[in-house]
Image: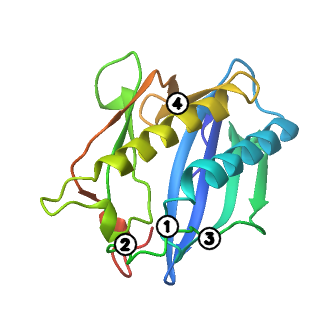
Amino acid sequence: MATPDVTGGVRAVYNYIQHGEQRANVLHGIKATDWTLAELTNLALALKGVWDTNFRNWIADDVALETIVCTSLEGSASEQYTYNCLINCNGTNASAPAPGNASSTLSLRTSGIGRSKRGRMYPPGYVETHINDDDTIQSAHLTSLAGLGSALMTAFINTSSSNLGVFSRVLNTIAPVVSIVLENILDTQRRRLPQRGR
């Protein structure tokens, strides 16, 4: 699929591996002008900082961050920077991991309405202690997820005054995220089932 052309648009992908299976979180961002290679590099480093501070301290220790790939959305003129993780790559939570498809939803909200104006993120690497007996998310873990959402928004803001965004392939637009809503119900990312991809 061709890279979209959205002025000021960027795609940032966390790529992980967990017990031989690929995992990924795809994020988008938007600013007034197209991204330079230096700005893509800075964004990747900022997102690595989020991994170090707000991700790996709760994520299962059998999840390893492999790369963070930042791509400017400029059609055939797109540029890309790949950060290869060499240090602090594994999660640090040694509790028994939950099934790979277990997650919860961070709902990315913009000022608009409708499916094209809302996005979702499903963090990987849950452990059994994150989940209550009634399939809700343990309250302390919700606090961690709230911190993650805030840190992701800040990482974009601190990189060239951009915003975390929601990409609509139908409209070929990226709308800035204004809030992140947490759901405390256990969710599933079916593509993370064995042999189902990411």
Residue 9 visible at all: no
Label disc, if present, on residue 100 of the rendered structure = 2
Q: Which of marks 3 and 1 precedes in the sequence?
A: 1
Q: Position of residue 69 (x, y in %)?
A: 69, 54
Q: Which of marks 1 and 2 precedes in the sequence?
A: 1
Q: Which of marks 3 and 4 precedes in the sequence?
A: 3
Query: How much space separates mark 4 and mark 3, taking CA atoms?
Result: 27 Å
Q: Amino acid at mark 1?
A: Arg
Q: Residue at x 85, y 41 (%)?
A: 37
Graded by Cα atoms within 10 Å as few (under 14), some (14 to 19) or many (20 or more), the crowding at tag 2 reads: many
Q: Amino acid at mark 4?
A: Gly
Q: Amino acid at mark 3?
A: Asn
Contact? badges 1 and 3 (CB < 8 Å): no
Q: Quadrant of the C terminus?
A: bottom left
Contact? badges 2 and 4 (CB < 8 Å): no
Q: Amino acid at mark 2?
A: Gly
Q: Position of residue 83 (x, y in %)?
A: 77, 58
**Observer-nearest of 191 and 142:** 142
Query: How much space separates mark 1 and mark 3, taking CA atoms?
Result: 13 Å
